[in-house]
């Protein structure tokens, strides 16, 4: 029992003087471990009178508990100290100036598109999307541009197979929409188009168009003019004038290109409109009867008009940007101006 007493005292002293966790572990092994001092006391029980053994066992257990308790307490002390140190070293200086988070905004092209969509949705159009990878049939054939037609040269593109290509125009979506057989149609379809063009200030192998298609009974060129004039006014301002120049597209007859009066110089001629006073923004026309027929619409009952706007053209014009490449370079010094 004297022995037990001195084990307890020694353990208490050593725990008290331990300087770190490692030291505590050593102490634990030495006193409580398999080969530790208390265990060896238990092993020597056989030398004790049998009637004293239970009492002895009980005392060993009590001492074991006491040592364990002191170890736990000391361990908790160490942990508290470590945490305190950590908190001290990691204090935040709230008086330091903050880091400003830079917030992005919509790309000029996206802004133009949203504005355009708002205008047409306001007139009762729905917005639909079509595939960028397209069959030759939808991009050319069904729009009255048969194989070997020279118009295909003007819109050379990237072919995946002989019959599958990256669409050169959103006009392909007209065909998908007509094939659904739900009439009347009043839709616009924005999207990316592709052409095998060299990059320069006004060309890019990929750009965006917004297609428009209206088909109903009794639609005439007058509807086309009224609609597109209203569109131009809403986009560029009330006093915008429009001009339709005869043109040729395979899928419309008659066809036209629409110019708007330059909103910078009000038609007088400036750097922006290259002295012309007018800027071309879209192609349009009355849907060719054969195009209706090919998609299963009776041209004797239904007529329609269509148009195709170059989205970048409008962005460049609206935001007075003189090089299309800037729109694709993702240079924030440029983009943050808009
Ligand atoms: N798809 C033509 C182009 O890329 C633009 C166009 C012209 C679309 C006349 C039309 C249209 O819907 O009627 O040049």
Image (tube, rainbow, N blue to C red):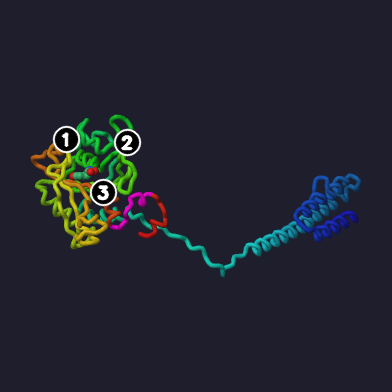
Disc 3 CB within 8 Å of nearest ligand 1 atom: yes
Up the image or down, 165 lies above or below 274; here it is: above
Up the image or down, 144 lies above or below 192; here it is: above
Left or right of residue 71, residue 330 in this image: left
Residue 11 badge:
none
Residue visible at 51% across and 63% down?
A: 99
Earlier residue among tags 2 and 1: 2
Using the rendered view, name the quadrant where residue 247 is placed: top left
Say which element carries label 2. Answer: loop
Say which element carries label 3. Answer: strand
Given this view, does label 3 or label 1 mark the residue nearer the observer? 3
Residue 310 badge:
3
Earlier residue among tags 2 and 3: 2
Residue visible at 15% across and 47% down?
A: 256
Quadrant (top left, top right, bottom left, bottom right) of the N terminus: bottom right
Quarter of the image where ligand 1 sits: top left
- Which region shows up in magenta? 318-328
Say which element carries label 1. Answer: helix
Q: CA distance from mark 2 to mark 1?
A: 25 Å
Q: CA distance from mark 2 to mark 3?
A: 19 Å
């Amino acid at each position: 029992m004297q022995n037990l007493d001195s084990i307890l005292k020694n353990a208490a002293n050593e725990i008290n003087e331990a300087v770190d966790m490692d030291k505590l572990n050593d102490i634990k092994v030495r006193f409580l471990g398999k080969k530790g001092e208390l265990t060896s006391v238990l092993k020597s029980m056989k030398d004790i009178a049998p009637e004293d053994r239970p009492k002895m066992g009980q005392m060993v257990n009590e001492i074991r508990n006491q040592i364990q308790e002191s170890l736990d307490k000391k361990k908790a002390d160490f942990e508290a100290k470590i945490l305190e140190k950590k908190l001290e070293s990691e204090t935040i200086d709230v008086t330091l100036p903050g880091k400003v988070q830079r917030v992005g905004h919509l790309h000029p092209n996206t802004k133009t598109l949203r504005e355009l969509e708002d205008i047409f949705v306001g007139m009762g159009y729905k917005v639909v999307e079509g595939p960028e990878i397209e069959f030759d049939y939808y991009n050319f054939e069904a729009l009255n541009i048969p194989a070997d037609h020279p118009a295909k040269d003007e819109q050379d593109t990237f072919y995946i197979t002989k019959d599958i290509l990256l669409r050169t125009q959103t006009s392909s979506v007209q065909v998908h929409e007509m094939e659904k057989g739900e009439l009347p149609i009043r839709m616009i379809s924005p999207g990316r188009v592709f052409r095998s063009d060299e990059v320069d200030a006004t060309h890019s192998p990929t750009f965006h168009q917004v297609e428009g298609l209206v088909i109903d009974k009794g639609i005439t060129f007058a509807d086309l003019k009224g609609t597109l004039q209203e569109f131009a006014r809403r986009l560029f301002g009330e006093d915008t004038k429009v001009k339709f120049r005869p043109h040729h597209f395979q899928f419309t007859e008659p066809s036209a290109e629409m110019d708007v009066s330059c909103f910078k110089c009000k038609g007088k001629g400036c750097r922006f409109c290259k002295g012309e006073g007018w800027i071309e923004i879209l192609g349009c026309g009355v849907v060719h009867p054969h195009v209706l027929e090919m998609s299963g619409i009776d041209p004797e009952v239904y007529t329609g008009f269509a148009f195709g706007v170059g989205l970048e053209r409008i962005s460049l014009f609206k935001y007075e940007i003189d090089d299309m490449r800037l729109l694709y370079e993702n240079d924030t010094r440029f983009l943050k101006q808009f």
